[in-house]
Amino acid sequence: MIIYIASYPRSGNSLTQQTIQTFFERPMTVVYGGSRKPETYASGAVNFIKNWRWPKDKTISKSLWGKLHAQINRNNLEKWIALYDLNVPPYTKDCRYLLPGCLSVLTPKNRQKLAAEESPFFIKTHELPYQEYFEGEYVILPVRHPGSVLWSYFNFIKDFWQDVKTLDEVIRGEVTFGSWSEWYQSWNQAIPSLNDRLLRLRFEDVLADRRRACQQIKALISLDYNPSKQELSFEELHKKDPQHIRSGKANGWEKYYTDNQLSLLWELHSATMQQFGYEMPK
């Protein structure tokens, strides 16, 4: 089973991942290179994983995992699979984990194989939807008010990518991953091919009640979670991952926009905003 956590950047993907990892006690895969999650899982720092095993025929160092590995082993799915034992109920042995940097490995053939497996593969992505989906592929679609998203994305680009973009350009979608509205409308068009296997989660709702979000996810994928787990406060989540979890506020972004930028935001994104239940601040 594959569960894609698919979102436009800065839309609550990291909060959704943390919620799943905390309550469902399963590891996360990022389709892009640079993720250090496997090293964390292998180190024993995560209490729900034990006996981590890298692929037996791995021939390059962990530091080179990513593009080079993808070029060499793109068509050999097993070279992308690590194993672990679940250290919490139901204590499953030989669980399978897809290593990060795997975007080019997710060919239709490989996706169909992974979708048919019993192990759940939780995969973070910012990509647009596939043309078709296989039985066993599910999507969790985090969404957030675009005013908050685009202000956060503007700052992320400036702080971490060292790129010079104006807020107007970000609002217009002149950035990697394009327009906020067009990105989500592409996913709306994919809903029929997924039947009932897509769950839209608003960032604001997850922030307010993570256990309710867990109930919704369980209803989607029929996977149990541990309701007794203690959830981290947003401040604790930010401390653990400040790059990806920047602000836990639903409002307040509007003070950084000029009147013209607020008008531009409404002009370009109002239709999709209203579809998701968002309005402009008063």
Image (cartoon, rainbow, N blue to C red):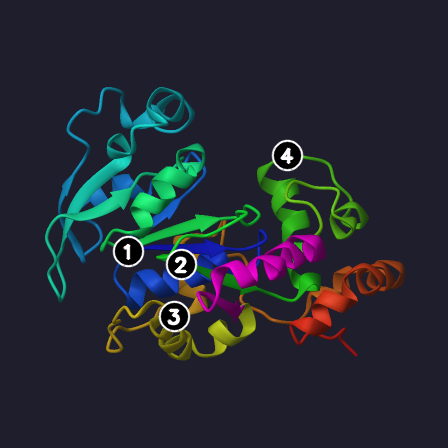
Residue at (80, 61) in percent of width and height: 265
Q: Mark 4: give few (<14), some (14-19) or many (20+) Cα within 10 Å.
A: few
- The answer to whether the residues at label 1 and label 2 have Cβ atoms under 8 Å apart is no
Tell me the quadrant of the picture where the N terminus can be found.
bottom left
Question: Gap in Å between the C-alphas at discs 3 and 4?
Answer: 39 Å
Q: Position of residue 282 (x, y in %)?
A: 79, 79
Q: Position of residue 143 (x, y in %)?
A: 57, 64
Q: Earlier in the sequence, mark 3 or mark 4?
A: 4
For residue 79, side relative to residue 106 (left or right):
left
* Most frequent secondary structure within the magenta stretch: helix
Find numbered disc 4 in the image and state the secondary structure of the residue it sits on. Answer: loop
Chain part drawn in magenta: 180-202
Alpha-carbon neighbours of circle 2 within 10 Å: few (<14), some, or many (≥20)? some
Residue picked out by circle 2: 17
Evaluate if marks 4 and 2 touch, with contact meaning CB atoms under 8 Å apart. Answer: no
Which residue is labeled 4 in the image?
162
| Of the image marks 4 and 2, the number of the one nearer the N terminus | 2
Q: Amino acid at mark 3?
A: Leu
Alpha carbon distance from label 1 to label 3: 13 Å
Q: CA distance from mark 4 to mark 2?
A: 26 Å
Mark 3 lies on residue: 220
